[in-house]
Amino acid sequence: MKIRVFSAIIAFLLLASPIFQVVRCESAEDAAAAEVVEGGDLGIVGDETQDPADSTIGPAPNVNTICMFPKNPGKTVPAGEETELLVGVHNEGESALKVHFVSATLHLPFDHRLSIQNLTSQGFNASVPSSAQATFDYKFALSKFLQPGSFDLVGYMFYEIDEHPYVSVFYNGSIEVIESGGFLSGESVFLLTLGIGLLALLGFWVNGQIHHFSKKTKKAPKVEVGTGISEANMDEWLEGTAYARSVSSTKKEQKKKK
């Protein structure tokens, strides 16, 4: 009984120990591939695969991996929806390589020590002959509870050559996570509504300023001064002068004629 318990503990420790270590390889955006492999005999491996960043296995020499986001140059990934990624491999070695599965992990941009999510591992069990190329259709889905923002995606290809295991990093870069359900998210709608409201307030303020300025620039109405007051003031000013006596005599003569 004790031997069985001890054997079970040893087996658990062996399964829990890190067995993969990857060395970063160059990623590319243009996939030059001769063959597209969809699915595979192994199918989906699962979400609970071990993080390959903790492993001791690196890429094989003369094997190059590339990837691209088809019809998605902006690398925007809706949370909770399936996303397609094409992974290409070019075998320049002398022996054929056998692709076991493709996996990926999601990290914070400033810290890769902890993974936010271990994405689904998709098995292929496909053979790539020497001097040949192949492309694998890898599909994954981020958690629907993931907040929108910029994250780092690291993709891995697990394969073997002559019964020796290898791991290559086909992508190590940023992606933009957006809310599911279309281009406009709840946050975008809020910001759009806020912007429209601010523009409306600005329009009302500008209109009020123009109206206020137009009132100030209106000319004051002309005030007509009665001729009687002007003439009376003139008579007082000219009283006693020769001009006043001449005007007075003229007025008397006009009255006599009437």
Image (spheres, grey):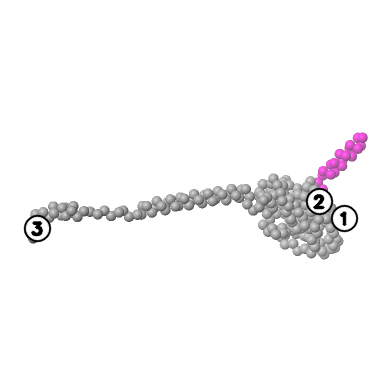
Residue for point 37% across, 52% down: 215
Q: Position of residue 105 (x, y in %)?
A: 74, 50
Q: Mark 3 points at which residue?
A: 255
- Residue ID for mark 1: 163
Residue placed under numbered mark 2 in the picture: 44
Residue range in magenta is 1-23
- Of discs 2 and 3, which sits in the foreground? 3
Tell whether position 217 is magenta. no
Q: How far apart are marks 2 and 3 (CA)?
A: 127 Å
* Disc with the residue nearer the chain's start (1 vs 2): 2
Q: Position of residue 165 (x, y in %)?
A: 84, 54
Where in the figure is residue 113, as x and y percent of width and height? 72, 46
Residue type, numbered disc 3? Lys
Residue 217 located left or right of residue 189 = left
Crowding at dot 2, Cα within 10 Å, few <14 / some 14-19 / many 20+, comes out as: some
Q: What residue type is labelled 1?
A: Glu
Give me the C-alpha separation between circle 3 and circle 1.
142 Å
Between 220 and 79, the residue placed more toward the observer is: 220
Q: Quadrant of the C terminus?
A: bottom left
